[in-house]
Amino acid sequence: MKKRISFPVAFLTAVLILSGCSSVGKQEAGNKEVTEQGASSAITEAASADPYDRLEGLDYEGYRFRFCYYGTEANGWNPYIDVAESNGEVLNDAAFDRNAKVSELLNVSFSMIRDPAYETLFKNSIYAGDEEYDMALFWTDLNGATYMTEHLLFDWNDLPLVDLEADWYNQSANEAFSVAGTQFFGVSDMTFTVQQHFRFLYNKQLAEDNGLKSVYDDVLSGTFTFDKMLADIRKCYKDLNGNGEADDADCFGFATNAPHTNLFFRNTGGPEVTVGPDGYEINIYSERIVTLVEKVVGLLQEKACFDTTQGNAHYNVFNEGRALFAPYSSDPVLLRDYDVDFGYVPYPKLTEDQPYYTTTTGGFMGLPVSLSDPARTGAIIEATSIASHELVIEAFISAYIEGKILRDKESVDIYRMMRSSAVYDISYNTDPSGKLRTISAYYKHFLDTKSTDVASWYAAEGPGIKEKYDELWKLASAKKE
């Protein structure tokens, strides 16, 4: 059984306040051969030792670890795994040093292919059995259920030399992507830079101009609720062109689009699907969810709400200083060019007695089921994850996010809290029903129709959703047996 997330004392205090296959790796002559059994016992013996110890002596003779990733360089979101050279940029050089350490330890290097059709390339390689890629690094828009139902991926629980309970693996992802004892995807600090979470930006000057209490104070005191947010939103609306109508030229309290509005149901409502001992628990209908649907639908009908139907136009409204809040999910580097003085906060709570939910996505890894040398793959992932934990994370947070993106200490503190407590939800990327994945079709119904009749919609859609999740659980159980 995997451990749940273990946080530092300082973070726990903040939260209280915020209330089958070959297993032999190639080695130099004379080195002891590593087997799956030996790897497993080595993990146990090394629990309190240097994490690199069990990897010492492995030599993969210059093996090039090949992985595919989405898009092109122009898409941004650099995963900083395949780093060719040191260039003086702190994050790049931290990743370069990480790779140098792994290369020296295991005698390996990295090669990344970026392609919009990376999933097709990865799947075709699996179907052909040619092992063109050792791994796929998946992005947010993924229909992961197909990889599970078609049994295309190697079980992370069978991967030698990998200690999934270690601090450099995301325990929330371990739980979310485990199905009946089989784990299809893994998330580690190796992919930290592209683990995306969803948040709000807020206009500090607009808040001050309208006599509002600092949103930071609300967040840190645990009182940043939907109702508190709505009250502040209403205070910020101004009819700037004086035509007596709410239109695109006005000043708003909230600027959004459909995907970000939909995210209230995960970030304010909590995970839509959780994993229980005997199956999935579907959390899309309750008195609490009905209340949330009513509030979100009501928000969209407020004159103080700018709801665009054109891409991310709401970002422009916010950057022009004409919105108090705007949900944000794009590459953080883009925020460097924002003129408006912004703060960084989580989605609001529904009630004060709940935690802040921070849904995260991206950065998860899949390994081809036809993996010919699991020990080699395990060693490379483990070493890179350990070294990323040691060298890359702080560089990413301190030098990149804190040094170049965020603009005040409060934002930094809240950013660290959100990244530490962020959770993966299987329904976002690996939903077998097609109703809950990414921009949930289930909740989109309420936003499109402005209906709040959750009971009727759940009666029509809920059984089919549950049936698909039950089928997925049975498929995984059968594979494990």
Image (spheres, helix red, strand yellow):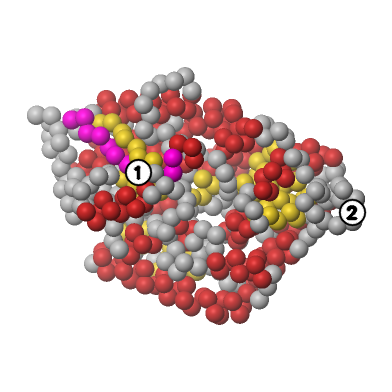
Q: Residue at x 14, y 33 (%)?
A: 27
Given this view, does label 2 or label 1 mark the residue nearer the observer? 2
Q: Nearer the viewer, residue 109 or 98?
A: 109
On the image, the x and y values in percent for residue 209 come to 85, 40
Q: Amino acid at mark 2?
A: Asn
The image position of residue 273, as x and y in percent, is 49, 64
Q: Regarding mark 2 in the picture, which secondary structure is present there?
A: loop
Contact (CB < 8 A) between labels 2 and 1?
A: no
**In this view of the protein, can residue 375 be seen by the observer?**
yes
Which residue is label 2 attached to?
Answer: 243
| Disc marking residue 68 | 1
Residue at image location 75% in from the left, 55% down from the top: 305
The location of residue 30, given as percent across then percent down, is 9, 29
Label 1 element class: strand
Looking at this view, is 146 or 428 the one in front?
A: 146
Magenta stretch in the rendered image: 61-72
Q: Residues within 10 Å of mark 1 (few under 14, many from 20)?
A: many
Residue shown at 89%/54% (left/top)?
A: 243
Q: Whole-percent x and y of residue 398?
A: 54, 29
